């Protein structure tokens, strides 16, 4: 492939509404990357399509995705809409031999995700799933420390994920997240990204038991002032094993003070991965890595004198954007050179299998 040829991109869900995910993530990175030409977007109505075309100064804007995916000029289709819409859009894009980049989750039904994985593999198109926390520099640093054996034998992992969202209130925009079939629940989104981060770092997680709790019962839409039933749990406690040897427990909660913490304990030291200005979404960046080493346990009389020290930090407020810059830089190289270096649909499907297993095990 000609490496000087720009990759022409169309974004499904490319509204310039400041609340829209693509305008915060994909669009600014693509507009500033000389390897890409953001050529088209599709939105949900003619007015927003026209607005996007003018604001972004692009060639095409559609009010339906089909025209975008059928456009022969487009090489890569980015899907940044609600999960229930992913399946039909991605299937159509693959049918037209487009490279595809799907936001997480791949779909809201496991069989659809499995089908798309097979279709993309058979079509031999590049297929990327939006698990962008894998691009974190401190995640890579932590993995290197573990692989070097600096912590000794890994004994346990505890992950705490809490978000102020998905609690006892909703808006018109977020109400769908309480539908257990939406693919956007607490476990699907906050849990999915966090579990992917943990398994990327440590290995395969096998859940053995899970408890789910719907703490609120009714959710208040603060815009309509109507109550809706809490269809999806706001609390998950999961215990299991990583690589059949590392004792692990995962706590995921909605409607509380946001936090992300992953504590990994080994015989010779511990790592703690946290998040500055957390919203309970590790994929948003701002990750911080701390280390505490104690090579000789026989010499330890107490915890006095042993403390965690910061050894790595993502690049502040710009870290989310840096994740997407890393993804698109790597993707361009993959497309030009026929490589597959990024998490693909199969990786997304495997995390969905893990989430489904947790749901099957859960006691409510």
Image (cartoon, helix red, strand yellow):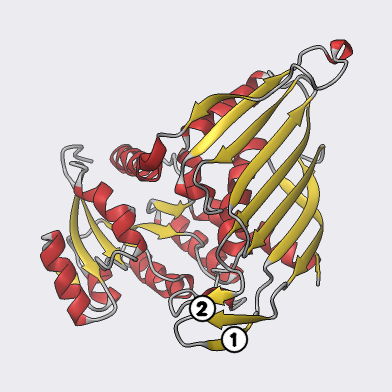
Asked if one can make out residue 139 in the rendered structure from this viewpoint, the answer is: no
Q: Do the residues labelled 2 and 1 touch (CB within 8 Å)?
A: yes
Percent coordinates x, y for residue 223 in the rendering: 44, 83
Q: In this view, does 346 lie above or below 141?
A: below
- Mark pair 2, 1: CA separation: 8 Å
Percent coordinates x, y for residue 342 in the rendering: 45, 43
Q: Which residue is labeled 2 in the image? A: 175
Percent coordinates x, y for residue 328 in the rendering: 32, 44
Residue at 77% from the left image edge and 48% from the top image edge:
249
Q: Which residue is labeled 1 in the image? A: 228
**Quadrant (top left, top right, bottom left, bottom right) of the N terminus:** top left
Residue 222 vs residue 288, the one in the foreground: 222
Q: What element carries label 2?
A: helix
Q: Is residue 36 above or below residue 298?
A: below
Residue 114 vs residue 360, the one in the foreground: 360
Residue at 71% from the left image edge and 34% from the top image edge:
264
């Amino acid at each position: 492939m000609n490496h000087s040829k720009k990759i022409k991109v169309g974004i499904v869900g490319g509204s310039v509404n400041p609340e829209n995910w693509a305008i915060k993530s994909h669009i600014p990175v693509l507009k500033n990357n000389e390897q890409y030409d953001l050529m088209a977007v599709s939105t949900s109505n003619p007015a927003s399509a026209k607005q996007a075309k003018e604001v972004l100064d692009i060639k095409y804007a559609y009010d339906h995705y089909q025209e975008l995916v059928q456009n022969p000029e487009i090489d890569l289709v980015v899907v940044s809409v609600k999960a229930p819409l992913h399946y039909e859009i991605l299937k159509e894009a693959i049918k037209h031999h487009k490279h595809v980049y799907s936001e997480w989750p791949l779909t809201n039904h496991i069989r659809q995700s499995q089908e798309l994985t097979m279709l993309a593999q058979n079509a031999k198109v590049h297929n990327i799933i939006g698990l962008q926390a894998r691009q974190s520099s401190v995640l890579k640093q932590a993995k290197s420390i573990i692989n070097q054996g600096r912590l000794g034998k890994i004994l346990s992992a505890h992950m705490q994920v809490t978000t102020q969202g998905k609690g006892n209130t909703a808006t018109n925009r977020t109400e769908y997240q309480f539908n257990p079939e939406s693919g956007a629940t607490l476990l699907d989104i906050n849990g999915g990204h966090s579990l992917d981060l943990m398994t990327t770092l440590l290995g395969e997680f096998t859940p053995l038991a899970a408890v789910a709790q719907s703490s609120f019962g009714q959710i208040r839409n603060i815009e309509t002032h109507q109550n809706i039933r809490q269809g999806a749990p706001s609390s998950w406690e999961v215990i299991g094993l990583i690589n059949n040897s590392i004792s692990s427990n995962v706590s995921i909660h909605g409607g509380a003070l946001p936090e992300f913490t992953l504590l990994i304990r080994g015989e010779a030291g511990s790592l703690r991965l946290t998040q500055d200005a957390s919203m309970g979404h590790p994929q948003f960046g701002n990750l911080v890595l701390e280390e505490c080493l104690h090579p000789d346990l026989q010499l330890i009389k107490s915890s006095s004198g042993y403390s965690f020290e910061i050894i790595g930090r993502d690049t502040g407020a710009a870290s989310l954007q840096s994740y997407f810059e890393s993804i698109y830089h790597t993707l361009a190289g993959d497309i030009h050179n026929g490589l597959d270096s990024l998490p693909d649909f199969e990786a997304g499907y495997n995390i969905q299998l893990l989430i489904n297993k947790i749901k099957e095990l859960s006691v409510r």
